[in-house]
Amino acid sequence: MRVGLSTLRHVRGFDVVRPLSIGTVIAIMLPLVLLPLASIFIYGTSKGLGSFWAALSAPEAVFALKLSMVTSFWATAFNVVFGLFAAYVLSRYDFLGRTAVIVTISLPTAIPTAVAGFALLLLWGPYGTLGRLMAPQGPQLMFTAWAIILANIFVTFPLAF
């Protein structure tokens, strides 16, 4: 008599891996994403929904929401056009320095956003490399909506390509 292990095959029925993997994803997302969002909502509505709505419809909040929507739209439009172009060029052609270009594009995902903001300030700020060149010709770029668009593009471009 031959003793052999039968091959296990999932046919229809209960799959142990599925609930474990879903539970793991939820357990990871809970403290990182869901609880901070819940705490914002709980803190915002602690004085009642009327107070929450009044704060949300205040002129400063409306301005901030509109500014965020407009700057995000233009950064997204830029990322779609140039991200598709960069993805096309980098996937279609093999050239010297291709890996360096990919690493350079991916670099903003590896640095903290505060460092990215500081780098942009050092480049475009009034005492920065390009900021000094632009000062005699026109208005300052930093601390404007254009700077917000540039920062959004810098941080999100690696995600577009």
Image (cartoon, rainbow, N blue to C red):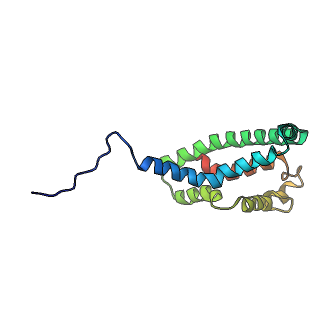
Q: Residue at x 76, y 39 (%)?
A: 69
Can residue 152 be seen from the camera position used here?
no
| Count of numbered circles in the view | 0
State the image coordinates of residue 9 (x, y, percent, origin top left). 29, 46
Which of 137 and 116 lies nearest the eye of the viewer?
A: 116
- Quarter occupied by the N terminus: bottom left
Q: Vertical placement of 59 versus 130: above or below? A: above
Quarter-of-image position of residue 130: bottom right
Which of 139 and 114 lies nearest the eye of the viewer?
A: 114
Which of 47 and 157 lies nearest the eye of the viewer?
A: 47
Most extreme residue toward the left is: 1
Q: Vertical placement of 108 versus 91: above or below? A: below
81 sits to left or right of 92: right
Q: Residue at x 15, y 58 (%)?
A: 3
Can residue 72 be seen from the camera position used here?
yes
156 sits to left or right of 124: left
19 sits to left or right of 122: left
